Image: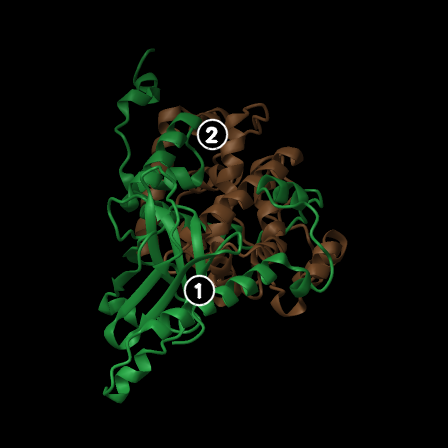
Amino acid sequence: MHSHVVGNLYCTRRLWHKSSGEQGWLDRQRGKGDSTFPSIGELLSVSIEIDSRSNVAALAPLLARVALGERAAFETLYKATSGMLFAICLRVLADRGEAEEALQDAFVAIWNKAMQFDPARASANAWLGSIARHRAIDRLRANSTGINIASIDLAESVVDESVSPADSAQSASDKARLDDCMRQLDTRRQTLIRTAFFDAATYDELARRAQAPLGSVKSWIRRGLLQLRECLES
Amino acid sequence: MSTSSDRFDDDSTSPPPSDEIRAGEYVLGVLDSFERRHTQARIASEPTFARLVDEWENDFAALTIDIVEVAAPMQVWPRLRRRLGWPVAEAVGPRFWNNAGFWRGLTAFAAAAALATFFINRLPTPTERPATEEKQTTLPVTVLVRDDGSTGWIASIDVTRGKLLMAPLPHALAGDGRVDELWIIPAGKAPLSLGYVSNEKAYTVAVPPALQKELIAGATLAVTLEPQAGMPHAAPTGPIVAKGGIQKI
């Protein structure tokens, strides 16, 4: 069901991408819940249990309660989203221990900044995901040991052709729109932008891995971003 | 041999990118730690720039929607609690009755109700008055409770006049120049500022007409510590001092 046309790029040091096979998302959720959170599960009443994907809209009211300092709501939010946010941290940080630290950083930030979340400006998933990703990138930059040296082949397409499950109508249409705009970029820009995003690689790292001049890599990515913005707004 | 490709390579020759592109670069994660810190400082201080970043975050979030979740290791939650300064072990059992906050809240509510009754009884009772005014002597109150369970303010909302009376239990400010700012938080939405409130004296807040419709049961009143300049602020930045849900209007 998922065709893996992802080349040798961002799978080189990541374990995560679409490896779940045919198992339904709900099954995975259930399995995860059982094995990971027995004690928290007892603390949470069934009525406030939130399913982070099938019920994306429910995260915004939950965040509003977290903003008011409700610890129970924070616990529910943690239970509903820590799996997704941990996966995002693991994408950026190959080191599992570092990814755990980044996940904690992210939830501390979520607890402290929940009042700044504005559903009119961002979806809850995007807001939470970006906090986790940036805390992970901060750690990656702070400790430059795990440099990724996997080479980038600029002629190779890394377009992900898989059909993703529609988590919600909104996120599915957002994804379709972005995919569509990404496809309009030339292969080189597309490859660099995807690799940059998934590996959180700096310009320097990208230039080294693609064996291309730094200035060229910068201008390819900047033009790619410009083209994306125009397409996304059209 | 020196040459165009070398010069092209030289970063100093490329013009600085527009804000739009710089925001995209930040979200993409291509900036080195120096540029990254600089950009984060801009996000914190320039709302227009922060908005550009939000836009890119929303767009690129689509790349992560089909990410396969990885269960967070069990030790993360207790460590997180410790970092937040919460007790690591939570009492297991019927939560409501074991929850100290619940009892503190209940005690605070009883105290506040007594105080409110005191206020109401002290109101002068004119001999003749129209029926509409009679109602106003029995406006419901909303109690804004502090984290430790004590009462911060008692709010009384007069919808017909678009006024909100905030009576504090007098308390000291943090001493760093920040003052108390009141917010109305509609259910599931971002907080909207109602401006300054006093920490010492009963203070009447004139609610802007656009916000009056938000003063309904189910919304929450909260007070945070904020810089005096620029009030009312677009969004809170400081910690919550006290909060309370509006039960009844």
Q: In the rendering, what colour is chain A?
A: brown
On screen, residue A34 versus residue A188, left or right, reads: right
Where residue B230 appears, as percent x and y from the top left, is 24, 47
Q: Kindly identify which residue carries mark 1.
A: B143
Residue at point 26% right, 65% down? B207
Report the amino acid beneath label 1.
Answer: Val
Q: In the rendering, what colour is chain B?
A: green
Asked if residue A152 shows in the view, the reply is no
Dividing the picture into quadrants, the one containing residue B123 is bottom left
Query: Circle 1 — which element?
Result: strand
On screen, residue A49 versus residue A209, left or right, reads: right
Residues indicated by labels 2 and 1 sit on the same polypeptide chain: no
Q: Nearer the viewer, mark 2 or mark 1?
A: 1
Where residue A38 appears, as percent x and y from the top left, is 75, 56
Where residue B249 appears, as percent x and y from the top left, is 38, 76
- Most foreground residue, B242 or A67: B242
Query: Circle 2 — which element?
Result: helix
Report the amino acid beneath label 2.
Answer: Leu
- Most foreground residue, A106 or A65: A65
Q: Kindly identify which residue carries mark 2.
A: A206
Chain letter behind tag 2:
A
Q: Decide: marks 2, 1 in contact (CB < 8 A)?
A: no
Chain letter behind tag 1:
B
Total labels: the figure holds 2
Residue at point 23% right, 88% down? B128
Dividing the picture into quadrants, the one containing residue B212 is bottom left
Q: Is residue B148 above or below residue A169?
A: above
On screen, residue B64 versus residue B132, left or right, reads: right
Q: How is the image coloured?
A: by chain
